[in-house]
Image (cartoon, grey):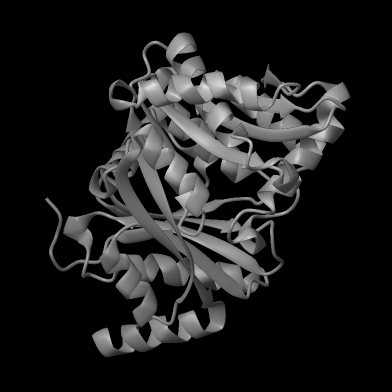
């Protein structure tokens, strides 16, 4: 039973020192967050591994918790941005029953103090709930971009359309080959990185897409997913002279076998209008059904401005949209706004 008045104890935690009981409590908070926003939480083991990997990565995610007795009622993760100097990203969740008590404000204040000491100037956060959007705007957040998470139940997919797109692909692209890869071959690395970075930077809101993918970063991701036991499968299209023209990829966690995450789909501008994106998406759906029979649904996220990809996904049967928004704050102004709010509350 949470106290309606007392402020929970706040502390910065080194995740590497957490006990199994700590992780169980933290995962319960993580699962509540997903339940509230209508999404599916990954498994406890996958969550713990991903959190530890983020804490040990170059961006160095750091965590603060709010604890009331043995109960964890709030958690904040602070990650240094790799795309822009002086940027930090915040991920915050507080249990509904612990809100309106200043818990979130106190967690953010603690993290901002650390971020400012580290030289950060800009804060970014993404939120699913409309009430969180209004809170960001009240504290001076500037809307940066929007996106939509879509879900496809495989039993409800438009399989007639999927089959048609899969069959029409090679007919419309007579000399184009479809290739499946997990570990990018060294001989293909240069062409793959060129395809990824050109299509990644051509998407809506490309200025927020992050730095170009390097071979070292790709290899690090491959090794991390391999350690987790996850399958990271990419389909690419190869043109007659060896140019890679399009790609799509999925991520599959066997411990959470009913769910497949569809990541990025992109086609170089010079090769659009030939049905390559439809061919790739349809072929990947067939691969998922054949390779992962336990899978029941796919999730994917689209930028709100990516109208062509939104149309493709809707035609395939993706639905149940969950909208999210990303807001940006000047760090010093946000700290001042929080301090003013704290003074009024005291």
Residue at left offset 32%, top offset 48%: 321
Q: Quadrant of residue 156?
A: top left
x and y percentages locating residue 307 in the rendered image: 48, 53
Residue at left offset 41%, top offset 85%: 337
x and y percentages locating residue 176 in the rendered image: 73, 24
Q: Is residue 209 visible?
A: yes
Residue at left offset 22%, top offset 64%: 99
263 horizontally vs 107: left or right = right
338 horizontally vs 291: left or right = left
x and y percentages locating residue 328 in the rendered image: 51, 72
Depth order, front residue of 229/214:
214
| Quarter of the C terminus within the rendering | bottom left
100 horizontally vs 210: left or right = left
Depth order, front residue of 28/147:
147
Residue at left offset 15%, top offset 68%: 5
x and y percentages locating residue 81 in the rendered image: 64, 59
| Position above or below: 87 against 191 | below
Depth order, front residue of 4/281:
281
């Amino acid at each position: 039973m949470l106290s309606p008045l007392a402020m929970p104890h706040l502390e910065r935690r080194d995740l590497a020192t957490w006990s199994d009981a700590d992780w169980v409590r933290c995962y319960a908070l993580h699962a509540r967050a997903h339940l509230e926003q209508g999404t599916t939480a990954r498994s406890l083991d996958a969550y713990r591994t991903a959190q530890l990997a983020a804490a040990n990565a170059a961006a160095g995610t750091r965590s603060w918790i709010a604890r009331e007795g043995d109960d964890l009622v709030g958690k904040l993760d602070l990650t240094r941005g790799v795309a822009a100097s002086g940027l930090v990203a915040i991920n915050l969740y507080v249990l509904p029953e612990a809100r309106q008590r200043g818990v979130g404000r106190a967690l953010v204040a603690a993290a901002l103090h650390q971020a400012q000491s580290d030289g950060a100037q800009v804060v970014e956060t993404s939120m699913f709930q409309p009430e969180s959007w209004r809170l960001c705007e009240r504290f001076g957040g500037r809307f940066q971009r929007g996106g939509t998470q879509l879900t496809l139940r495989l039993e409800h997919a438009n399989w007639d359309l999927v089959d048609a797109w899969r069959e029409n692909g090679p007919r419309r692209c007579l000399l184009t080959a479809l290739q499946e890869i997990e570990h990018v071959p060294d001989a293909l690395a240069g062409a793959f990185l060129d395809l990824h970075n050109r299509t990644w930077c051509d998407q809506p809101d490309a200025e927020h897409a992050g730095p170009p993918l390097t071979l070292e970063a790709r290899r690090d991701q491959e090794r991390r997913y391999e350690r987790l036991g996850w399958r990271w499968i990419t389909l690419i299209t190869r043109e007659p002279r060896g140019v890679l023209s399009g790609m799509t990829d999925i991520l599959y966690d066997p411990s959470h076998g009913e769910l497949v995450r569809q990541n990025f789909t992109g086609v170089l501008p010079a090769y659009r209008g030939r049905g390559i994106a439809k061919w790739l998406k349809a072929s990947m759906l067939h691969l998922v059904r054949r390779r992962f029979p336990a899978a029941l649904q796919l999730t994917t996220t689209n930028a709100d401005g990516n109208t062509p990809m939104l149309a493709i996904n809707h035609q395939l049967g993706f639905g149940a949209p969950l909208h999210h928004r990303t807001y940006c704050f000047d760090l010093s102004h946000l700290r001042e706004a929080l301090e003013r709010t704290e003074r009024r509350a005291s």
